[in-house]
Image (cartoon, rainbow, N blue to C red):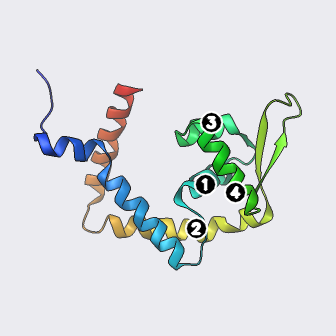
Amino acid sequence: MPNNQFKKGELYSFMTGKASTAIARRLQKNMKQSGIDITVEQWSVLYHLWKNDGLSQQDLCNATFRDKPSITRLVDNLEKLKLVKRVASKSDRRINQVFLTEAGKELDDKTMKVANDTLNEALVGVTNDKVDIAKEVLQVVYDNLK
């Protein structure tokens, strides 16, 4: 017996990530108001580089769930903004590693504050228990489909 407790109209809204889209839009708005001139998509690439500088473009694809052309475009634009630089791997010149520039490193604290403030804004009225349940459910859904 299926465990689908969604009404027909709710299912598609849920599946398309209504909440995720709303958070991304608010994050973009909040970054712009804070004088941060990057997109949420660019921020997601920078976020992974702040955690582990020098990732390959393929690693960035995997980390951000984007395809190669999307990552290539994002890295191209981040290079134009002088936030990252590509360096051919010493062990395999077919692989480009992406490194933060000083300007890219400097955005870390400012953008993370805006991201945390945005998430806190989104979670007003949501208890920690409910956040834990949501994370658990979404992890199970992801694990079922990967």
Give the mark nearest the N terminus, 1 or 2.
Answer: 1
Q: Quadrant of residue 26?
A: bottom left
Residue at 14% from the left image edge and 44% from the top image edge: 9
Residue at 63% in and 41% down: 60
- Tell me which label, 2 or 4, sits earlier in the chain: 4
Which is nearer the eye, 9 or 53? 9
Q: Say if mark 1 contacts mark 3, CB within 8 Å.
A: no
Q: Is residue 102 left or right of residue 109?
A: right
Q: Does dot 3 land on a helix, a strand or a loop?
A: helix
Residue type at mark 4 is Leu
Which label belongs to residue 60? Answer: none
Q: Nearer the viewer, mark 2 or mark 4?
A: 4
Tag 3 residue: 68
Who comes first in sequence, dot 4 or dot 3? 3
Give the label on residue 78, or none: 4
Residue position for label 1: 47
Callout 3, which amino acid?
Lys
Which of marks 1 and 4 precedes in the sequence? Answer: 1
Q: Residues within 10 Å of mark 1 (few under 14, many from 20)?
A: some
Q: Quadrant of residue 90?
A: top right
Looking at the rendered image, the quarter that the N terminus falls into is top left
Is residue 64 visible to the viewer in this orientation of the structure? yes
Q: Is residue 98 left or right of residue 14?
A: right
The percent position of residue 31, horizontal first and vertical second, equals 52, 71
Q: Are marks 1 and 2 in contact (CB under 8 Å)?
A: yes
Quick check: marks 2 and 4 in contact, CB under 8 Å?
A: no
